Amino acid sequence: MTHQVHAFEPPERFVAGTVGPPGDRTFFLQARGGGRLVSVALEKVQVSLLAEKLEELLSEAQRRFGVQLPEPVTTVGDNDPLDTPVDEEFRVGTLGLAFDVDTATVVIEAIATGEAETEVELGEPDDDDEDEDDDVDVEPDDDLDRLRVRLTPEATREFIERAKRVVNAGRPPCPLCGQPLDPAGHLCPRHNGYHR
């Protein structure tokens, strides 16, 4: 079976977003460019980890390669909803990150879930590589669909800030147990199961 590589180098727009009400949201990465629109579904924890690891990657690129990084974004950038139609190309199983020293760009690769894959993986480049490439801890199957995006450090910072806003825009946490509160409340374990 053939696989598709959806490459956007660079995209016109690359964002994390959701569809659905809080508590029942589906998370997506969406890339647009060259008349194409690709949306891939993933878990909330993957979006959160992606933003965290991208920040670490930018810091490491600055430390190791002297890359000039933009200041952290303080203004609200792209806050528009996902482009429609939001058609899921595939569900993400593995995320790979790399920094291309030659072009001073960040490469993000979202790889489809394989049949045997059961856990979320986030691969990062090895520290020993002088010229970092797309390396992941467990090499995913080569015949899986993938979304590859190449971003400037500025676009990466904007993506990070939007991803954080999207993750934090869900249901507010219970002040006692930290679990998400539904509009009708929830059964709080700190209240011995009483409805809060």
Image (cartoon, rainbow, N blue to C red):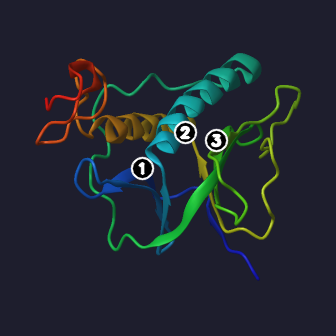
Quarter of the image with the N terminus is bottom right
SS at mark 2 in the image: helix
Q: Position of residue 151 (x, y in %)?
A: 57, 46
Q: Earlier in the sequence, mark 1 or mark 3?
A: 1
- Mark 1–mark 3 Cα distance, whole angstroms, equals 16 Å
Q: Position of residue 58 (x, y in %)?
A: 61, 28
Q: Which residue is labeled 2 in the image? A: 50
| Amino acid identity at mark 1 | Ala
Residue at (31, 24) in percent of width and height: 178
Q: Earlier in the sequence, mark 2 or mark 1?
A: 1
Left or right of 193? Residue 50 is: right
Image coords of residue 89 (percent x, y): 52, 71
Badges 2 and 1: C-beta atoms under 8 Å apart?
Answer: yes
Between circles 1 and 3, the one closer to the viewer is 1
Residue 106: image tag:
3
Compare residues 67 and 18 and report the one nearer the observer. 18
- 7 versus 47 height, above or below: below
Q: Which residue is mark 1?
A: 16
Q: Residues within 10 Å of mark 1 (few under 14, many from 20)?
A: many
C-alpha gap between disc 2 and disc 1: 10 Å
Q: Which label lies toward us, 2 or 3?
A: 2
Query: Label 3 sits on what residue type?
Result: Val
Label at residue 157: none
Give the SS element for disc 3: strand
What residue is at 72 percent from the left and 36 percent from the top?
124
Task: Identify the amino acid type marked 2.
Answer: Leu
